[in-house]
């Protein structure tokens, strides 16, 4: 138990460093450039994360899902196929909307980073996964801002290159297998469809997590987008324990699904995660007003209420446990896909109706409602299909 506690707090510290880095990035961006530009950066980064997840996460997680398979397709080829699909979609979208071509380069490079990072989870700790996925990118963005690079697209592009070379350097230095190969001796359509399903469901999970930001970009000003993003950053402190846990237990989850039971160590990890999330939520409630002042936003009653609702949303997500990871790595990923699509549709419809009337308050309440409904559906589906109670 002592070792489990130590590992838990090490993981929290690493993930916490990533969250502190995001706070620092927001503060530097707002002080050095502007709140409006920070809103634009937030929107563009959301698009990068979405498409990069579609490109790289599915093929990468397939490696983990097939951990005990006697024969499996080369997942890197699936990454290449997803990249080609994304490039085609990009040029179709450009017929209607103008985007900087560097944003496409950023998406492809970031997708490759996600793919390699996912595959290395088989023989690296979750702390390394978090370091490469979050921390390196954030540090790079802060450094680029201090180097007087002010364009959101340029900051994202150059930071993705830095992130890529950081992952490659780590893999080479510590001799980690990165599953990058053009070998095509065995290709399974079923493997690709499973990979594609994971990619789409992971991408939809990103949409579900970012849809409020996407919609705020349509209905609200860039300054309000920045405000909502800053409040989300504080609220996501509560999700820090479950994110740290997810980064470290993918292999255990795959084994648990196959054996239809959770070992005692994982049960203790889940308990620690929930207790820590409750403590973090109390800290966030207490510091909410002060947090707004740090970022030069008004600590009005409205902003406090919006922040409080976002805190409750992330607490609910943490208390339900890693339902998303369990369904993605099991035969339930199709149910995950359907429930996520329904969650996005409900969010979009409610936002379309109420967002123009009530602004970010409506956005935060809709986020809470759809998050709880999504978690409830997955939690009971896992329990019914696998007898696993999270």
Image (spheres, helix red, strand yellow):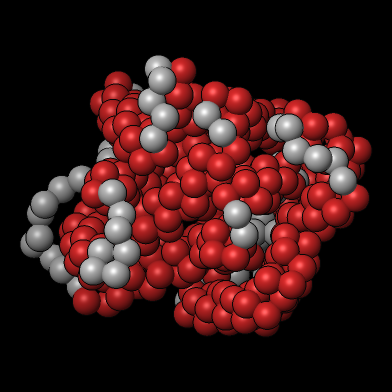
**Quadrant of the rendered image containing residue 84:** bottom left
Name the one closer to the observer, 368 or 338: 368
Q: How many marks?
A: 0
Q: Residue furthest top?
A: 147
Q: Quadrant of the N terminus?
A: top right
**Quadrant of the rendered image containing residue 257:** bottom right
Residue occupying image coordinates x 72% and y 64%: 359
Q: Is residue 76 above or below residue 11?
A: below
Say left or right for 236 vs 84. Answer: right
Name the one closer to the observer, 50 or 195: 50
Residue 125 appears in the figure:
no
Say left or right for 105 vs 315. Answer: left
Residue 182 appears in the figure:
yes
Residue 93: x and y in percent read: 28, 68
Residue occupying image coordinates x 20% and y 45%: 180
Residue 179: x and y in percent read: 25, 46
Name the one closer to the observer, 268 or 100: 100
Residue 76: x and y in percent read: 22, 54
Q: Quadrant of the C terminus?
A: bottom right
Residue 247: x and y in percent read: 54, 45
Residue occupying image coordinates x 60% and y 70%: 260
Residue occupying image coordinates x 47% and y 80%: 334
């Amino acid at each position: 138990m002592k070792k489990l506690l130590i590992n838990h707090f090490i993981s929290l510290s690493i993930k916490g460093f990533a969250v502190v880095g995001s706070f620092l990035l927001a503060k530097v961006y707002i002080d050095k450039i502007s709140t409006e530009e920070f809103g634009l950066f937030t929107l563009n980064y959301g698009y990068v994360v979405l498409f990069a997840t579609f490109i790289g996460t599915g093929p990468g997680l397939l490696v983990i899902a097939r951990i005990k398979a006697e024969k499996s397709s080369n997942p890197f080829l699936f990454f290449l196929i997803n990249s080609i699909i994304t490039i085609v979609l990009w040029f179709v979208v450009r017929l209607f909307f103008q985007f900087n071509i560097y944003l496409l380069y950023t998406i492809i490079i970031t997708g490759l980073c996600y793919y390699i990072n996912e595959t290395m989870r088989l023989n690296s700790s979750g702390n390394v996964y978090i370091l490469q996925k979050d921390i390196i990118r954030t540090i790079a963005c802060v450094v680029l801002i201090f180097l007087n690079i002010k364009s959101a697209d340029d900051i994202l592009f150059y930071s993705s290159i830095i992130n890529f070379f950081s992952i490659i350097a780590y893999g080479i230095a510590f001799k980690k297998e990165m599953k990058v190969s053009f070998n095509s001796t065995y290709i399974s359509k079923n493997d690709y469809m499973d990979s594609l399903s994971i990619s789409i469901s992971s991408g939809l999970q990103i949409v579900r997590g970012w849809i409020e930001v996407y919609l705020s970009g349509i209905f609200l000003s860039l300054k309000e987008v920045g405000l909502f993003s800053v409040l989300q950053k504080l609220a996501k402190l509560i999700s820090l324990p479950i994110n740290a846990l997810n980064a470290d237990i993918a292999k255990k989850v795959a084994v648990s699904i196959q054996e239809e039971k959770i070992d005692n160590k994982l049960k203790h990890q889940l308990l620690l995660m929930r207790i820590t999330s409750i403590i973090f939520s109390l800290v966030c409630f207490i510091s909410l007003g002060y947090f707004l002042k740090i970022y030069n936003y008004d600590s009005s009653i409205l902003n406090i209420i919006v922040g409080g609702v976002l805190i409750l949303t992330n607490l609910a997500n943490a208390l339900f446990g890693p339902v998303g990871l369990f369904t993605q790595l099991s035969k339930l990923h199709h149910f995950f896909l359907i429930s996520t699509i329904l969650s996005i549709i409900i969010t979009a419809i409610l936002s379309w109706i109420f967002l123009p009337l009530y602004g970010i308050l409506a956005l935060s309440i809709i986020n809470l409602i759809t998050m709880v409904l999504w978690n409830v559906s997955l939690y009971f589906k896992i329990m019914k299909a696998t007898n696993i109670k999270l």
